[in-house]
């Protein structure tokens, strides 16, 4: 016979738990003449059986039912399914934690979180040490966050000697300038980079240009070049985020975003930048679009990963009208602009193949180059000149 404290010690439960078991009719103690409650071997074994049933996921009520009658198979099947679901969720949790530690792939998780909570995702990535441009453009992330610094170092090794970091040409920029309904006097250039379009604008307008980028080193080089050319009175620079531009409403008569708006999303850019324009001010934005209604699966798979928001031109035009702009002009970027970027980039890869071919950054860039050269008729940049307000 066991006193309740002795039974509790045998089964590893508290006195309170055993009293509750007795209240539920799961065990039945005997009260001695001295007032103490004692339990027999049968009670000990029932408690141990109950513990096994509880470990299988049953409730105390269900345990009692199993002890007092034939097992309900449907109940056990239901509990088994519940446990399988819990195991699946736990495995997903484990996979995520392992990926964060560098033992798995976080790509799909980043994509899913960016759809569910894009702003929170961006804030979190920046707290992990990514700068805004890296965080906004998920294609810059290596599959393993723990190897990101090496990935970016390899990426920059490829691009450091190249003049252009994206498709473009002086002629396309001039064509967009010439399509403006009136000459601008105060231009905001978003994502100026090395300032190739900035130089074309300063040479083909009389406007003052405020160039923004989140890379201060790029802005410093741009300022130095303008100062050397005696054009520094035409330029102001600001190291700022394109998602939080530090300017008052109704400040600019032209916002220029050549190959940069996709970073924050075209629709978001259309909405957030519009208040900065004066009435009937213009926005020039270029964006990667489908050039066919029936792209190959190879191209679809690539852009679903690199730029899921790629659209047909007609879809972009509808979005622009809906956002409160009217379309002044639009045209596809030229083949020359495409090759101004992918030609030198392809040559640079050949130059580095002997030392970098096995790095993930090299492989990713090479895949993009091959696809973009072999499927150039299926997609490309498109230039849109818009005016604030409806016609």
Image (tube, rainbow, N blue to C red):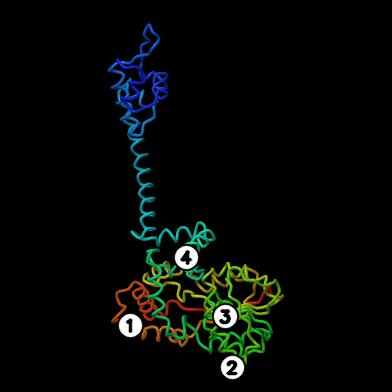
Instruction: Please state if 95 lies on the left or on the right of 323 as rendered.
Output: left
Residue where numbered disc 3 is placed: 330
Q: Earlier in the sequence, mark 4 or mark 3?
A: 4
Q: What separation in Å lies between label 3 and label 2 (alpha carbons)?
A: 32 Å
Q: Residue at x 47, y 65 (%)?
A: 129
Q: Earlier in the sequence, mark 3 or mark 1?
A: 3
Q: What separation in Å lies between label 4 and label 3 (alpha carbons)?
A: 38 Å
Q: Earlier in the sequence, mark 4 or mark 2?
A: 4
Count how many numbered circles sit on residues in the image: 4
Q: What separation in Å lies between label 4 and label 2 (alpha carbons)?
A: 37 Å
Residue where numbered disc 1 is placed: 352
The crowding category of the residue bearing disc 1, from other C-alpha atoms within 10 Å (few below 14, some 14 to 19, many at least 20), is: few
Residue where numbered disc 2 is placed: 229
Residue where numbered disc 4 is placed: 129
Which of the two marks, 3 or 2, is nearer to us in this view? 2
Q: Residue at x 67, y 70 (%)?
A: 275
Q: Quadrant of the C terminus?
A: bottom right
């Amino acid at each position: 016979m066991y006193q309740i404290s002795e039974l509790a010690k045998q089964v590893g439960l508290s006195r309170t738990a055993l009293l509750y078991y007795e209240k539920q009719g799961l065990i039945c103690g005997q009260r001695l003449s001295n007032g103490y409650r004692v339990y027999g071997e049968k009670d000990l074994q029932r408690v141990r059986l109950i513990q096994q049933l509880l470990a299988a996921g049953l409730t105390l009520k269900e345990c009692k039912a199993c002890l007092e009658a034939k097992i309900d198979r449907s109940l056990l099947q239901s509990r088994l399914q519940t446990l399988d679901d819990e195991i699946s969720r736990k495995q997903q949790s484990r996979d995520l934690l392992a990926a964060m530690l560098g033992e798995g792939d976080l790509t799909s998780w980043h994509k899913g979180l960016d759809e569910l909570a894009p702003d929170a995702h961006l804030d979190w990535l920046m707290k992990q040490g990514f700068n805004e441009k890296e965080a906004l453009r998920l294609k810059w992330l290596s599959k393993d966050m723990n190897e990101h610094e090496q990935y970016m170092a390899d990426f920059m090794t490829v691009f450091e000697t190249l003049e252009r970091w994206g498709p473009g040409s002086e002629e396309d920029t001039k064509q967009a300038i010439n399509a403006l309904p009136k000459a601008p006097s105060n231009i905001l250039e978003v994502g100026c980079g090395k300032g190739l379009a900035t130089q074309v604008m300063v040479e083909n307008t009389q406007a003052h240009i405020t160039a923004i980028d989140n890379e201060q080193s790029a802005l410093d080089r741009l300022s130095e070049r303008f100062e050397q050319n005696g054009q520094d009175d035409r330029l102001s620079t600001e190291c700022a985020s394109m998602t939080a531009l530090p300017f008052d409403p109704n400040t600019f008569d032209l916002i220029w975003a050549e190959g940069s708006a996709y970073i924050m999303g075209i629709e978001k850019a259309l909405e957030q930048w519009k208040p900065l324009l004066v009435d009937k001010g213009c926005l020039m934005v270029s964006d990667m679009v489908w050039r066919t209604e029936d792209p190959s699966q190879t191209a679809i798979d690539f852009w679903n990963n690199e730029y899921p928001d790629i659209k047909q031109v007609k879809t972009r035009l509808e979005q622009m009208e809906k956002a409160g702009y009217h379309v002044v002009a639009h045209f596809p970027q030229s083949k020359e602009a495409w090759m101004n970027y992918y030609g030198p980039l392809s040559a640079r890869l050949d130059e580095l193949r002997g030392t970098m071919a096995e790095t993930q950054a090299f492989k990713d860039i090479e895949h993009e180059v091959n696809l973009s050269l072999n499927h150039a008729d299926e997609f490309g940049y498109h230039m849109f000149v818009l005016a604030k307000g409806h016609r």
